Image: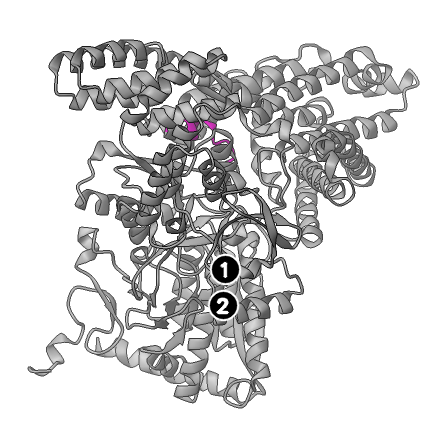
C-alpha cells in the first residue's frame, strides 16, 4: 500500500513537472476528443463546435490565469481503440490540461485506463448508465437516477397517464442493457409484475422496425395502460419514429419516452405525427430563461446558422467547461490533482435555471425535465423535478451496487468501496 | 372557456369535460385547436383565442364566433400547453361531439374515441348516430363502440353477455384487451366465462392475422434487400468485381433524392409529391456516371485481382463517405415522404404502411425491367457474352472494355435507385450504405452468383426467415441465426441456391 502510494506520489511529481513545463509556454491546451467521422460523427461534431465556442468565449474574456486557451482537436473516428490512442496522444504529446470528450459508453470505457494511468482529466458530457466513478473523470451528463428513473416515475403518475405495462426497447450495448437492468429492478420495487415488462434489443443502426412496433402494439393490447421506454441510440431512432407514425401509434395511447433523442436527432424527421411522445433530459432548447437565450444566440452567431439547435450534452459541456475554468482559477494552476480538489463543490448556473454543483462522487446535481415533442421539432416541458437531483454513481436498485460508495475525498478516496479506504485512520468523533 | 387557459392539467381536463357536456357544436373548433396546440392566451388581456400561423405572425380567431379579430406577433400570445392525459380527454370529448359530424372520417374517429372512453352517457347519442349512418364501415365502428360500452358498463348481465357476443365479430387487439379486462373483472361468472370464450376466438383470429402480418413484413424486408442487392448481383455476380463501395452508391442515390427534394422545396413546393419520382432517374444517372468513372479510373486496372479490388473499393467507400460528410455535414438529412407514401392501409387488424407497399411494388418493377434489359436488349446480350467468355466475345467484335464500363454503370445506377427507395424508410446519412453492404453480399452469395433469379429468391427467403425468427429470437439473435444458417448452407452448396452451370463457371 505504502509503496503504491509512494509510486503515485512520484508519478504525481513527475507529471506536475511535465505540466509546469507546459505552463511555461504561452497557452493552456484543452483537448477535444470527439469523433468527426464515422457513425458517431452525427452527434459528436456538434460537441466539438461547442467546445471551440466555449474556448473562444473564454479567450475573449482574457483567457485563463493570464494565458490564452488553445483547443487541440483530434478525431477518433468512431473507432473505440482509436479513442484510447488519441487520448494518450493528447495527454502525452500535447500535454493538455483537461480533455472534453467521448459520447458512447464504450468509448469512455476505452479511454478510462489511459486517463487513470497518466492521471489526466476527462469531462464526459453525455447521459450514461452509471455504475462507474473514476478519479480522473467528471461526469457532467445525467446518471440513471437523473433521467431514467424520474421519467418512469412520471409515466406511472396519474399526470403521465398511469402506465402499468412497460416495454423497454434498446440498442444492444452497455448503456441500454445497464439502464434497463436498473429500470427493471426499479419497476419490480414498485410492484410491476415480470409479465408486464417486455425487453427488446436491436443492433446499432437497425432500420426495419415493422415487427417490433407491431409487437409493441400487441403487447399494449392486454388491457393495461402501456408505455415504451426507449434507449435506442443514434441513427436507429429515425426509422423507429417513422414506423411508429406510420403504424398510427398515438402518444396518448402508447407514449414513448426516449433517453437518447434530443433536438439534434429530431432535426432529421417530420415531427408532426410524433407530437406528445416524450424525452427526459436535463436541458431543452425551448426552456425560456435569459441564460439559455444568450447561449442559443451565442451558438447561432458562432456556427453562423440560425437554424442549428442546442441540446443536453451541449449544456453539459457548458457546465463542465465553466466549472473547470473556475476550479483552475481557484487552484491557481492547471495541475490535475489540484484542480480535482478544487472541483468539489464548484457551482455553475444551469442554462435552464437552478445551479449545478459538482459532488465528491464526480457527478453533478441537475434538474430533470420531461418534454413532449412539438410539431416544430422542439420539446415542451410538461413536468420537472422540484430542485436539483444529485447524480448517483451506483444505483440503489441493483443490490450489489447499492452497497458501494463513490467519494473521492478523505477518508473514502474511492470510486467503488463498501468501507472508507482510510476508515481506520479517522479519529473517533470526526 | 377561461379555465382551459389557467390552472394545471387537472383543471384543464375538468374544463374540457364541462365543455363537452354542453354538447355545443361551437366547442369543436376550440377543442380541435387545443389538440393541435393552436389555442393560445393573449398575454395582454388573458383572452383565449384560436391562432393560425400566417407567415411570420399569427392570425387570431375568436373561438366563439370564429371571426378573425386581428394579427399578433408570436411573442404576444402564450400557447396553451397540452399533455398526453389532456390529449386523451380532448379526443374523448371530441368523440362525443362529432358523432353526428357531416364528415365520415370524423364520425369514424368519434366512434373509436367513444370505444376508448366507454362513456355510458353517450349511448343514446351513439344509437341515434347509428340510425342515421349511411356509411357501412363507419356504422360497424359505431356498433363496435356500442357493444364495448354495453359489455363493460351495462347494469344488466344479460345485456353484457349479448354485447360480448357482438364483439366476437371484431377481431382486433383493442377488443381483445377489452375482453381480457372483462374476463378478469366482471362481477357475474357467466359473463366472465362468455368473455373468456370470445377472447379465445378473437385470439385465434388474431394469430392468423399475425402470420399474415409476418408474411407482409418479410416480403417488405425482402424487397428492400432485393433493391440493395440487385445492383451488386450485376457487378459482383455477373462481372465478378467485389465492390465494397456498392453501399456508398446506395447512399449517393439517397443524397440525390435529398438534393432533388430540396430543389422542389425551394422552387416548386406545390409539386413536392412528385419529387421522389423525379429523383429516380436523377439518382440513376448520377450514380451510373460515378460508377462508370470508378470502373474506368480504378477497377479496370484490377480485373482478375480480387484482393486488390476489394481493398481499393473499400478505400473508395471511405473516401466517398467522408466526401459526403464534408459536403452535406455529418448529421441526417431530412427526406420527406410524399403524401401518397405516408400513412398506412388498414387491412383487418394489419397496418400495412404505404411506403413499404410502394417499395415492394417498386422493387418488383426494377427487377422486371432489369430482367428485360438483360434478356431482350442488344446490350444485355453483349453483357452476357462478355461475362461468359470474354476473349470469344472480343473475337466476335464486342468492345469488351465499353461493355464492362456500362455494366458497372448499370449496377451502380440500380444501387442509386435503391437509395431513392431507402431514403423513404431509413436515415439519409453518410453511413447509410454501410448497413446494407453485408446484407447485400449475403443475398447474392446465398442466391447464387451470376443469377438474378437467385438474388430474388435469396432476398425474399432471407427477409421472410428474418421476420419469422424475430418475434421468437429478437432482432439481434435472428440476424445471428441467419448468418450461421447461410454459412452452413454455403458449406453444402458453395455456389448458392441457383448455381450457374457450364464451362464458364470452371474458370
Position of residue B280 measured from the top left corner of the image (x, y, whole percent):
74, 30
The N terminus of chain A lies in quadrant: bottom left
CA–CA distance between discs 2 and 1? Answer: 8 Å
What residue do we see at 28% from left, 22% from top? B178
Host chain of mark 2: A
What residue do we see at 13% from left, 75% from top? A423
Q: Please, which colouring scheme is shown? A: one colour
- The magenta segment: A206-215
Decide if residue A70 is in sight here: no
Query: Dot 2, crowdedness within 10 Å: few (<14), some or many (≥20)?
Result: many
Most common secondary structure along the magenta stretch = helix
Position of residue B151 measured from the top left corner of the image (x, y, whole percent):
25, 18
Residue A285's disc is: 1
Position of residue B382 measured from the top left corner of the image (x, y, whole percent):
84, 17
Examine the structure image and report whether residue A61 is included in the region drawn in magenta. no
CB under 8 Å between discs 2 and 1? yes
Decide if residue A287 is in sight here: yes
Host chain of mark 1: A
Q: Earlier in the sequence, mark 2 or mark 1?
A: 1
Nearer to us in this view, A292 or A82: A292
Nearer to us in this view, A419 or B95: B95
In this view, the residue farthest toward the left is A428
- Relative to B38, does residue A194 appear above or below in the rendering? above
Query: Dot 1, crowdedness within 10 Å: few (<14), some or many (≥20)?
Result: many
Secondary structure of the residue carrying numbered label 2 = helix
Residue A292's disc is: 2
Residue A343's disc is: none
Secondary structure of the residue carrying numbered label 1 = loop
Amino acid at each position: 500500500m505504502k509503496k503504491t502510494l509512494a509510486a503515485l506520489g512520484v508519478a504525481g511529481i513527475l507529471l506536475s513537472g511535465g505540466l509546469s513545463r507546459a505552463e511555461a509556454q504561452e497557452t493552456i491546451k484543452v483537448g477535444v476528443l470527439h469523433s468527426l467521422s464515422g457513425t458517431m460523427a452525427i452527434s459528436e461534431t456538434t460537441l466539438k463546435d461547442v467546445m471551440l465556442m466555449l474556448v473562444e468565449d473564454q479567450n475573449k474574456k482574457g483567457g485563463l490565469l493570464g494565458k490564452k486557451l488553445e483547443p487541440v482537436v483530434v478525431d477518433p473516428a468512431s473507432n473505440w481503440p482509436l479513442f484510447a490512442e488519441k487520448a494518450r496522444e493528447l495527454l502525452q504529446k500535447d500535454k493538455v490540461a483537461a480533455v472534453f470528450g467521448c459520447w458512447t459508453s464504450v468509448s469512455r470505457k476505452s479511454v478510462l485506463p489511459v486517463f487513470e494511468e497518466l492521471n489526466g482529466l476527462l469531462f464526459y458530457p453525455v447521459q450514461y448508465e452509471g455504475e462507474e466513478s473514476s478519479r480522473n473523470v467528471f461526469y457532467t451528463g445525467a446518471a440513471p437516477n437523473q433521467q431514467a428513473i424520474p421519467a418512469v416515475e412520471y409515466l406511472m403518475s396519474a399526470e403521465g397517464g398511469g402506465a402499468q405495462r412497460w416495454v423497454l426497447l434498446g440498442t444492444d450495448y452497455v448503456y441500454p442493457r445497464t439502464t434497463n437492468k436498473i429500470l427493471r429492478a426499479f419497476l419490480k420495487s414498485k410492484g410491476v409484475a415480470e409479465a408486464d415488462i417486455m425487453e427488446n434489443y436491436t443492433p446499432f443502426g437497425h432500420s426495419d422496425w415493422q415487427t417490433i412496433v407491431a409487437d409493441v402494439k400487441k403487447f399494449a393490447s392486454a388491457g393495461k395502460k402501456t408505455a415504451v421506454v426507449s434507449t435506442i441510440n443514434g441513427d436507429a431512432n429515425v426509422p423507429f419514429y417513422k414506423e411508429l407514425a406510420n403504424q398510427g401509434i398515438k402518444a396518448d395511447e402508447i407514449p414513448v419516452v426516449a433517453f437518447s433523442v434530443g433536438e439534434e436527432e429530431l432535426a432529421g424527421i417530420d415531427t408532426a405525427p410524433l407530437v406528445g411522445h416524450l424525452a427526459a433530459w436535463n436541458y431543452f432548447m425551448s426552456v425560456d430563461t435569459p441564460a439559455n437565450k444568450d447561449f442559443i444566440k451565442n451558438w447561432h452567431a458562432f456556427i453562423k446558422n440560425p437554424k442549428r439547435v442546442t441540446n443536453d450534452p451541449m449544456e453539459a459541456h457548458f457546465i463542465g467547461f465553466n466549472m473547470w475554468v473556475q476550479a483552475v482559477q481557484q487552484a491557481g494552476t492547471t495541475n490535475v490533482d489540484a484542480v480535482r480538489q478544487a472541483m468539489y463543490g464548484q457551482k455553475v448556473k444551469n442554462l435552464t435555471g437552478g445551479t449545478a454543483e459538482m459532488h465528491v462522487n464526480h457527478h453533478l446535481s441537475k434538474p430533470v425535465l420531461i418534454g413532449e415533442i412539438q410539431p416544430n421539432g422542439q420539446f415542451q416541458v410538461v413536468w420537472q423535478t422540484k430542485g436539483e437531483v444529485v447524480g448517483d454513481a451506483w444505483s440503489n436498485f441493483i443490490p450489489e451496487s447499492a452497497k458501494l460508495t463513490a467519494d473521492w475525498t478523505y477518508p473514502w478516496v474511492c470510486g467503488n468501496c463498501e468501507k472508507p479506504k482510510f476508515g481506520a485512520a479517522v479519529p473517533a468523533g470526526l | 372557456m377561461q379555465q382551459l387557459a389557467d390552472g394545471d392539467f387537472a383543471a384543464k381536463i375538468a374544463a374540457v369535460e364541462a365543455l363537452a357536456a354542453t354538447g355545443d357544436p361551437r366547442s369543436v373548433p376550440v377543442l380541435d385547436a387545443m389538440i393541435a396546440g393552436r389555442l393560445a392566451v393573449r398575454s395582454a388581456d388573458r383572452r383565449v383565442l384560436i391562432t393560425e400561423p400566417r407567415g411570420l405572425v399569427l392570425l387570431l380567431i375568436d373561438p366563439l364566433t370564429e371571426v378573425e379579430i386581428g394579427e399578433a406577433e408570436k411573442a404576444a400570445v402564450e400557447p396553451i400547453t397540452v399533455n398526453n392525459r389532456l390529449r386523451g380527454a380532448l379526443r374523448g370529448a371530441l368523440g362525443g361531439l362529432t358523432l353526428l359530424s357531416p364528415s365520415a372520417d370524423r364520425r369514424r374517429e368519434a366512434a373509436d374515441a367513444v370505444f376508448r372512453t366507454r362513456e355510458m352517457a353517450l349511448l343514446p347519442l351513439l344509437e341515434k348516430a347509428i340510425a342515421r349512418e349511411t356509411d357501412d364501415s363507419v356504422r360497424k365502428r359505431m356498433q363496435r363502440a356500442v357493444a364495448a360500452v354495453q359489455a363493460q358498463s351495462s347494469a344488466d348481465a344479460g345485456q353484457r353477455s349479448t354485447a360480448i357476443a357482438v364483439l366476437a365479430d371484431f377481431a382486433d387487439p383493442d377488443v381483445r384487451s377489452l375482453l381480457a379486462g372483462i374476463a378478469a373483472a366482471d362481477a357475474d361468472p357467466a359473463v366472465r366465462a362468455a368473455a373468456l370464450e370470445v377472447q379465445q376466438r378473437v385470439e385465434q383470429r388474431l394469430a392468423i392475422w399475425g402470420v399474415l402480418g409476418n408474411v407482409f413484413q418479410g416480403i417488405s424486408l425482402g424487397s428492400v434487400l432485393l433493391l440493395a442487392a440487385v445492383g451488386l448481383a450485376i457487378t459482383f455476380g455477373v462481372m465478378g468485381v467485389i465492390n465494397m463501395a456498392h453501399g456508398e452508391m446506395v447512399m449517393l442515390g439517397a443524397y440525390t433524392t435529398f438534393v432533388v427534394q430540396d430543389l422542389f422545396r425551394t422552387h416548386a413546393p406545390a409539386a413536392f409529391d412528385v419529387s421522389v419520382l423525379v429523383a429516380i432517374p436523377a439518382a440513376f444517372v448520377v450514380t451510373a456516371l460515378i460508377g462508370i468513372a470508378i470502373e474506368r479510373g480504378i477497377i479496370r486496372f484490377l480485373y482478375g485481382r480480387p484482393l486488390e479490388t476489394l481493398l481499393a473499393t473499400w478505400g473508395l467507400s471511405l473516401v466517398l463517405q467522408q466526401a459526403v460528410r464534408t459536403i452535406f455535414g455529418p448529421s441526417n438529412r431530412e427526406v420527406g415522404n410524399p403524401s401518397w407514401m405516408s400513412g398506412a392501409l388498414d387491412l383487418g387488424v394489419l397496418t400495412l404502411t404505404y411506403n413499404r407497399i410502394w417499395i415492394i411494388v417498386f422493387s418488383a418493377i426494377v427487377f422486371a425491367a432489369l430482367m428485360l434489359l438483360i434478356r431482350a436488349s442488344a446490350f444485355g446480350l453483349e453483357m452476357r457474352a462478355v461475362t461468359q467468355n470474354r476473349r470469344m466475345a472480343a473475337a466476335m467484335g464486342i468492345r469488351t472494355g465499353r461493355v464492362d464500363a456500362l455494366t458497372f454503370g448499370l449496377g451502380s445506377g440500380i444501387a442509386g435507385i435503391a437509395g431513392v427507395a431507402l431514403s423513404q424508410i431509413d436515415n439519409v446519412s453518410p453511413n447509410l450504405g454501410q448497413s446494407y453492404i453485408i446484407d447485400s453480399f449475403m443475398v447474392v452469395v446465398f442466391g447464387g452468383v451470376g443469377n438474378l433469379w437467385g438474388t430474388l429468391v435469396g432476398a425474399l427467403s432471407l427477409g421472410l426467415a428474418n421476420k419469422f425468427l424475430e418475434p421468437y429470437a429478437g432482432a439481434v439473435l435472428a440476424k445471428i441465426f441467419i448468418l450461421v444458417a447461410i454459412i452452413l448452407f454455403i458449406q453444402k452448396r458453395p455456389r448458392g441456391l441457383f448455381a450457374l452451370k457450364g464451362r464458364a463457371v470452371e474458370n
